[in-house]
Image (spheres, helix red, strand yellow):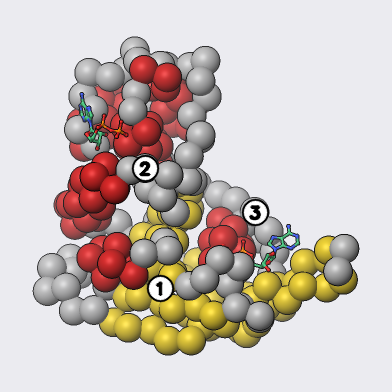
Amino acid sequence: MISIENISREYRSKEGQVRALSHINLHVAEGDFISLIGPSGCGKSTLINMIAGFIQPTEGTIRLNGKPIRKPGPDRGVVFQENSLFPWMTVEENMKLALRNSRKAVDYYLDIVGLKGFHKAYPHELSGGMKQKVSIARTLALSPDVILMDEPFSSLDEQTRIQLDYELKEIWEREKKTIIFVTHSIEEAIYLSTKVVLMTKRPGRIQREWELDRGKRWN
Ligand code: ADP
Ligand code: ADP
Protein backbone atom coordinates (compact mmCIF):
# COMPACT_ATOMS: atom_id res chain seq x y z
CA MET A 1 0.00 0.00 0.00
CA ILE A 2 2.77 2.45 0.96
CA SER A 3 6.30 1.99 -0.21
CA ILE A 4 9.01 4.20 1.14
CA GLU A 5 11.93 3.92 -1.23
CA ASN A 6 15.39 5.14 -0.30
CA ILE A 7 14.15 8.29 1.42
CA SER A 8 16.53 10.92 2.73
CA ARG A 9 15.67 14.33 4.10
CA GLU A 10 17.89 17.26 4.97
CA TYR A 11 17.01 20.49 6.73
CA ARG A 12 18.86 23.74 6.42
CA SER A 13 19.51 25.26 9.84
CA LYS A 14 21.84 27.72 11.55
CA GLU A 15 24.39 24.93 11.99
CA GLY A 16 24.20 24.15 8.28
CA GLN A 17 22.63 21.08 6.66
CA VAL A 18 21.07 18.58 9.06
CA ARG A 19 20.51 15.10 7.72
CA ALA A 20 17.30 14.09 9.49
CA LEU A 21 16.75 10.85 7.60
CA SER A 22 19.16 8.77 5.59
CA HIS A 23 18.14 6.08 3.08
CA ILE A 24 14.96 4.84 4.67
CA ASN A 25 13.13 1.87 3.13
CA LEU A 26 9.84 0.64 4.54
CA HIS A 27 6.86 -1.23 3.23
CA VAL A 28 3.40 -0.76 4.70
CA ALA A 29 0.79 -3.36 3.78
CA GLU A 30 -2.94 -2.82 3.96
CA GLY A 31 -4.12 -3.56 7.49
CA ASP A 32 -0.73 -3.02 9.09
CA PHE A 33 -0.43 -1.19 12.38
CA ILE A 34 3.11 0.14 12.27
CA SER A 35 4.78 1.86 15.19
CA LEU A 36 7.82 4.06 14.72
CA ILE A 37 9.93 4.27 17.86
CA GLY A 38 13.31 5.76 18.64
CA PRO A 39 14.98 8.63 20.49
CA SER A 40 13.92 12.23 20.10
CA GLY A 41 15.40 13.62 16.88
CA CYS A 42 15.63 10.33 14.97
CA GLY A 43 13.24 11.61 12.31
CA LYS A 44 9.90 10.00 13.23
CA SER A 45 7.91 13.21 12.69
CA THR A 46 9.86 13.96 9.53
CA LEU A 47 8.86 10.59 8.12
CA ILE A 48 5.19 11.02 9.10
CA ASN A 49 5.15 14.55 7.65
CA MET A 50 6.55 13.27 4.36
CA ILE A 51 3.93 10.51 4.11
CA ALA A 52 1.30 13.14 4.89
CA GLY A 53 2.74 15.25 2.07
CA PHE A 54 3.45 18.26 4.30
CA ILE A 55 7.14 18.15 3.39
CA GLN A 56 9.08 16.57 0.55
CA PRO A 57 12.00 14.16 0.70
CA THR A 58 15.36 15.46 -0.47
CA GLU A 59 15.96 12.10 -2.09
CA GLY A 60 13.85 9.01 -2.83
CA THR A 61 10.14 8.41 -3.37
CA ILE A 62 7.14 7.55 -1.23
CA ARG A 63 4.31 5.83 -3.10
CA LEU A 64 0.75 5.32 -1.99
CA ASN A 65 -1.00 2.65 -4.05
CA GLY A 66 1.71 3.06 -6.67
CA LYS A 67 1.45 6.84 -7.02
CA PRO A 68 4.21 9.14 -5.73
CA ILE A 69 3.08 11.37 -2.86
CA ARG A 70 3.53 15.05 -3.68
CA LYS A 71 1.07 16.86 -1.44
CA PRO A 72 -1.48 16.25 1.34
CA GLY A 73 -4.67 14.49 0.28
CA PRO A 74 -7.84 12.88 1.67
CA ASP A 75 -6.31 9.41 1.22
CA ARG A 76 -4.14 10.18 4.30
CA GLY A 77 -5.62 11.24 7.64
CA VAL A 78 -3.43 12.75 10.33
CA VAL A 79 -3.95 12.79 14.11
CA PHE A 80 -1.59 15.14 15.95
CA GLN A 81 -0.47 15.14 19.57
CA GLU A 82 -3.01 17.73 20.68
CA ASN A 83 -4.81 20.99 20.01
CA SER A 84 -6.13 20.06 16.61
CA LEU A 85 -9.73 21.14 17.34
CA PHE A 86 -10.88 24.73 16.83
CA PRO A 87 -11.87 25.91 20.33
CA TRP A 88 -14.67 28.18 19.09
CA MET A 89 -16.44 25.34 17.29
CA THR A 90 -18.48 22.48 18.71
CA VAL A 91 -17.46 18.85 18.25
CA GLU A 92 -19.93 18.57 15.39
CA GLU A 93 -18.70 21.73 13.68
CA ASN A 94 -15.10 20.59 14.03
CA MET A 95 -16.00 17.30 12.38
CA LYS A 96 -18.10 18.82 9.62
CA LEU A 97 -15.30 21.16 8.67
CA ALA A 98 -13.34 18.16 7.52
CA LEU A 99 -16.32 16.20 6.26
CA ARG A 100 -18.57 18.46 4.26
CA ASN A 101 -21.29 15.84 4.60
CA SER A 102 -24.04 14.42 6.68
CA ARG A 103 -24.94 14.39 10.32
CA LYS A 104 -25.11 10.62 9.99
CA ALA A 105 -21.35 10.31 9.52
CA VAL A 106 -20.75 12.58 12.51
CA ASP A 107 -23.08 10.46 14.67
CA TYR A 108 -21.63 7.20 13.43
CA TYR A 109 -18.02 8.10 14.12
CA LEU A 110 -18.70 9.80 17.46
CA ASP A 111 -20.41 6.58 18.48
CA ILE A 112 -17.38 4.54 17.40
CA VAL A 113 -15.12 6.51 19.74
CA GLY A 114 -17.67 6.35 22.57
CA LEU A 115 -18.75 9.99 22.43
CA LYS A 116 -22.30 9.66 21.22
CA GLY A 117 -24.32 12.73 22.16
CA PHE A 118 -21.32 15.07 22.44
CA HIS A 119 -22.04 17.00 19.19
CA LYS A 120 -22.79 20.29 20.87
CA ALA A 121 -19.91 20.21 23.34
CA TYR A 122 -17.03 22.64 22.94
CA PRO A 123 -13.44 21.38 23.20
CA HIS A 124 -12.89 23.10 26.58
CA GLU A 125 -15.77 21.04 28.00
CA LEU A 126 -13.96 17.80 27.14
CA SER A 127 -11.06 16.01 28.82
CA GLY A 128 -7.75 15.59 26.98
CA GLY A 129 -8.63 12.00 26.12
CA MET A 130 -12.04 12.97 24.78
CA LYS A 131 -10.52 15.67 22.56
CA GLN A 132 -8.15 13.11 21.05
CA LYS A 133 -11.11 10.81 20.49
CA VAL A 134 -12.87 13.58 18.55
CA SER A 135 -9.71 14.01 16.45
CA ILE A 136 -9.72 10.27 15.76
CA ALA A 137 -13.44 10.30 14.89
CA ARG A 138 -12.90 13.22 12.54
CA THR A 139 -10.07 11.39 10.80
CA LEU A 140 -12.03 8.13 10.55
CA ALA A 141 -14.94 10.02 9.01
CA LEU A 142 -12.73 11.04 6.10
CA SER A 143 -12.21 7.35 5.25
CA PRO A 144 -8.53 7.74 4.46
CA ASP A 145 -6.51 4.77 3.15
CA VAL A 146 -4.02 5.26 5.95
CA ILE A 147 -4.12 7.05 9.30
CA LEU A 148 -0.94 8.76 10.49
CA MET A 149 -0.71 9.36 14.23
CA ASP A 150 2.17 11.38 15.68
CA GLU A 151 2.32 10.67 19.42
CA PRO A 152 -1.45 11.06 19.69
CA PHE A 153 -1.68 10.11 23.38
CA SER A 154 1.62 11.34 24.77
CA SER A 155 0.15 14.43 26.40
CA LEU A 156 -2.44 12.35 28.28
CA ASP A 157 -2.06 10.86 31.72
CA GLU A 158 -1.09 7.19 31.96
CA GLN A 159 -4.58 5.88 32.77
CA THR A 160 -6.20 7.72 29.88
CA ARG A 161 -3.45 6.66 27.49
CA ILE A 162 -3.96 3.01 28.37
CA GLN A 163 -7.70 3.40 27.86
CA LEU A 164 -7.23 5.09 24.47
CA ASP A 165 -4.67 2.48 23.35
CA TYR A 166 -7.26 -0.17 24.09
CA GLU A 167 -9.97 1.67 22.21
CA LEU A 168 -7.72 2.44 19.25
CA LYS A 169 -6.82 -1.21 18.91
CA GLU A 170 -10.50 -2.12 18.85
CA ILE A 171 -11.18 0.53 16.21
CA TRP A 172 -8.24 -0.67 14.11
CA GLU A 173 -9.61 -4.21 14.17
CA ARG A 174 -13.25 -3.35 13.66
CA GLU A 175 -12.85 -0.64 11.02
CA LYS A 176 -10.01 -2.47 9.21
CA LYS A 177 -7.65 0.47 9.11
CA THR A 178 -4.01 0.88 8.15
CA ILE A 179 -2.21 2.93 10.79
CA ILE A 180 1.27 4.39 11.20
CA PHE A 181 1.81 5.46 14.79
CA VAL A 182 4.69 7.36 16.38
CA THR A 183 5.44 6.72 20.04
CA HIS A 184 8.25 6.90 22.58
CA SER A 185 6.89 3.88 24.38
CA ILE A 186 8.10 0.42 23.40
CA GLU A 187 5.33 -1.00 25.55
CA GLU A 188 2.67 0.89 23.61
CA ALA A 189 4.28 -0.11 20.30
CA ILE A 190 4.27 -3.80 21.20
CA TYR A 191 0.71 -3.66 22.50
CA LEU A 192 -0.68 -2.02 19.36
CA SER A 193 1.38 -3.01 16.37
CA THR A 194 1.77 -5.63 13.69
CA LYS A 195 5.22 -4.21 13.04
CA VAL A 196 7.57 -2.20 15.26
CA VAL A 197 10.18 -0.08 13.50
CA LEU A 198 13.11 1.06 15.65
CA MET A 199 14.95 4.15 14.44
CA THR A 200 18.31 5.62 15.43
CA LYS A 201 19.62 9.14 15.04
CA ARG A 202 22.45 11.13 13.44
CA PRO A 203 21.43 10.47 10.82
CA GLY A 204 17.94 9.00 11.19
CA ARG A 205 17.89 5.40 10.01
CA ILE A 206 15.89 2.26 10.54
CA GLN A 207 17.88 0.02 12.85
CA ARG A 208 15.51 -2.90 13.13
CA GLU A 209 11.98 -4.06 12.32
CA TRP A 210 9.99 -6.62 14.24
CA GLU A 211 6.91 -8.29 12.82
CA LEU A 212 4.52 -9.19 15.62
CA ASP A 213 2.08 -11.97 15.01
CA ARG A 214 -1.10 -10.60 16.49
CA GLY A 215 -3.23 -13.48 15.37
CA LYS A 216 -5.94 -10.88 15.14
CA ARG A 217 -4.71 -9.09 12.05
CA TRP A 218 -7.72 -8.56 9.93
CA ASN A 219 -6.41 -9.38 6.45
P1 ADP B 1 11.59 12.97 16.01
O1 ADP B 1 10.18 13.12 15.54
O2 ADP B 1 12.07 11.55 15.96
O3 ADP B 1 11.86 13.62 17.32
P2 ADP B 1 12.18 14.93 13.96
O4 ADP B 1 11.70 14.39 12.66
O5 ADP B 1 11.36 15.95 14.63
O6 ADP B 1 12.50 13.72 14.93
O7 ADP B 1 13.62 15.57 13.74
C1 ADP B 1 14.69 14.87 13.09
C2 ADP B 1 15.93 15.79 12.99
O8 ADP B 1 15.64 16.84 12.09
C3 ADP B 1 16.33 16.44 14.30
O9 ADP B 1 17.72 16.56 14.30
C4 ADP B 1 15.67 17.80 14.23
O10 ADP B 1 16.38 18.75 14.97
C5 ADP B 1 15.76 18.10 12.75
N1 ADP B 1 14.66 18.96 12.28
C6 ADP B 1 13.34 18.66 12.29
N2 ADP B 1 12.61 19.65 11.76
C7 ADP B 1 13.50 20.63 11.41
C8 ADP B 1 13.37 21.92 10.80
N3 ADP B 1 12.17 22.40 10.44
N4 ADP B 1 14.49 22.63 10.59
C9 ADP B 1 15.70 22.14 10.93
N5 ADP B 1 15.90 20.93 11.49
C10 ADP B 1 14.81 20.19 11.73
P1 ADP C 1 -8.61 12.97 31.44
O1 ADP C 1 -7.70 12.27 32.37
O2 ADP C 1 -8.01 13.27 30.09
O3 ADP C 1 -9.30 14.15 32.05
P2 ADP C 1 -11.01 11.42 31.96
O4 ADP C 1 -10.54 10.84 33.24
O5 ADP C 1 -12.06 12.47 31.94
O6 ADP C 1 -9.76 11.90 31.07
O7 ADP C 1 -11.50 10.21 31.01
C1 ADP C 1 -10.86 8.95 30.99
C2 ADP C 1 -11.28 8.23 29.74
O8 ADP C 1 -12.71 8.17 29.62
C3 ADP C 1 -10.83 8.89 28.48
O9 ADP C 1 -10.67 7.89 27.49
C4 ADP C 1 -11.99 9.79 28.12
O10 ADP C 1 -11.95 10.10 26.75
C5 ADP C 1 -13.13 8.90 28.49
N1 ADP C 1 -14.35 9.63 28.89
C6 ADP C 1 -14.48 10.49 29.93
N2 ADP C 1 -15.73 10.92 30.03
C7 ADP C 1 -16.42 10.32 29.04
C8 ADP C 1 -17.78 10.34 28.63
N3 ADP C 1 -18.69 11.08 29.26
N4 ADP C 1 -18.15 9.61 27.57
C9 ADP C 1 -17.24 8.86 26.92
N5 ADP C 1 -15.94 8.77 27.27
C10 ADP C 1 -15.54 9.49 28.30
Residue under label 1, please give it. Answer: 28
| Amino acid identity at mark 1 | Val
Residue under label 2, please give it. Answer: 156
Across and down, in percent, residue 19 comes to 73, 76
Residue under label 3, please give it. Answer: 54
> Disc 3 versus disc 1: distance between alpha carbons?
19 Å
Across and down, in percent, residue 191 comes to 23, 65
Compared across the picture, whether 134 is left or right of 26 comes to: left
Whether residues under marks 3 and 1 lie with C-beta atoms below 8 angstroms apart, the answer is no
> Disc 2 versus disc 1: distance between alpha carbons?
28 Å
- 10 Å neighbourhood of mark 1: few (<14), some, or many (≥20)? some
| Amino acid identity at mark 2 | Leu
Any atom of ligand 2 within 8 Å of the CB at mark 2?
A: yes
Residue 183 visible from this viewpoint: yes
Classify the position of ligand 1 by quadrant: top left, top right, bottom left or bottom right: bottom right
Quadrant hosting residue 16? bottom right
> Disc 3 versus disc 2: distance between alpha carbons?
25 Å
Name the residue nearer the viewer: 33 or 128.
Answer: 128
